[in-house]
Amino acid sequence: MRPQLGERSTTSAGPATPFEVSWLWDWVPATGSDVAERTAWTEYVASQLDSWVGEKVAAARAAWPADAVEEFPFTVGEMGSAVARDLLERADDLPRNCRLIWGAGFLGDEARWLPLVVLAEFRRPRGEDPAYLMAMVGAEGFDNDIREPNVDYVTTDHGDGIRVLALARSVGDALHGRVNAALRLEGRSAPGTQAGDVDVLLTTQVTSMDQLAVIGPGVEAVMHMIAAQFAAQPEDGVPPLRFVLETGQDPS
């Protein structure tokens, strides 16, 4: 049985939007994970999504025109399963040192933004100085940024990082918001793990302005989640955070 997601983390959405948003984040099973894990995860995610937005999907289905050319795309129960399958397919296409994270942002008890997806890449540090990470996350801007990025420094209980938010050009005249973050996790030596620092790069994009207003603190919540899981003691010899570095060596 898959464990329930932890408590929501609550953050301010930012100075321009004083309301508070709570976040739930979780890992998509990695490529190569066993069938039992993937099946349990799919059922769990489908159940969560249906409980969060099932009533809205049912209302939209009821309002769908009877004479519409296309049928309504799915039933309430099918929606969650379809999202879970799509996330698994995306995770299976990633390099071994990358993991996919999915989540949702809530206003009160309402699931307002979902599913949000963050790509996490685990890297062996390039020396002791983490300054190279500034370029990796585009702290001074990428070529397709249309204005100077907003840069925030993040301190977690187990390492420091940086979070960069910028408005960028998409294909054609479209725009998107990008969030790139980096976190240097301080080495651990818990049973079943290998001591040493680990650099984590996080990447996500959003296309709507309401998502752009809140996604920065959402990614910061991901950084705190990863840091806490990285340092946590393993249960039954299995660390709560499993990952592979780009060299192919599995420190967990």
Image: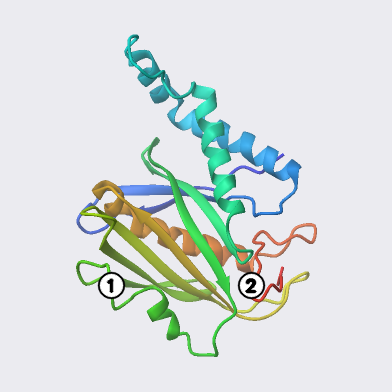
From what the image shows, is residue 160 above or below residue 47?
A: below
Choose mark 2 or mark 1, whichever is in front.
1
Q: Quadrant of residue 61?
A: top left
| Viewport quadrant of the C terminus | bottom right
In the image, residue 49 lies at what x, y percent? 50, 34
Q: Amino acid at mark 2?
A: Leu
Instruction: Tell me which residue sits at (35%, 17%) in the image.
Output: 69
Question: Is label 2 in contact with label 1 (beta carbons under 8 Å)?
Answer: no
Query: In this picture, is 87 found above or below 175?
Result: above
Q: Which label sits on residue 51? A: none
Q: Quadrant of residue 14?
A: bottom left
Badge 1: few (under 14), some or many (20 or more) residues near its Cα, within 10 Å? few
Residue corresponding to mark 1: 143
Helix, strand, or loop for circle 2? loop
Relative to 136, does residue 232 appear above or below in the rendering? Answer: above
- Kind of residue indicated by mark 1: Asp
Q: Nearer the viewer, residue 167 or 11?
A: 167
Q: Which residue is mark 2?
A: 245
User: Where's residue 224, x and y in %?
Assistant: 49, 63
**Nearer to us in this view, 168 or 71:** 71
In the picture as drawn, the residue positioned furthest to the top comes out as 66
Does 63 sit left or right of 183 as displayed? left
Q: Nearer the viewer, residue 79 or 173?
A: 173
- Residue 59 point in image, percent of width and height: 37, 18
Task: Label 1, secondary structure: give it.
Answer: loop
Residue 188: image quadrant is bottom right
- Crowd band around label 2 with a 10 angstrom C-alpha radius: few (<14), some (14–19), many (20+): many
Image quadrant holding the N terminus, namely top right
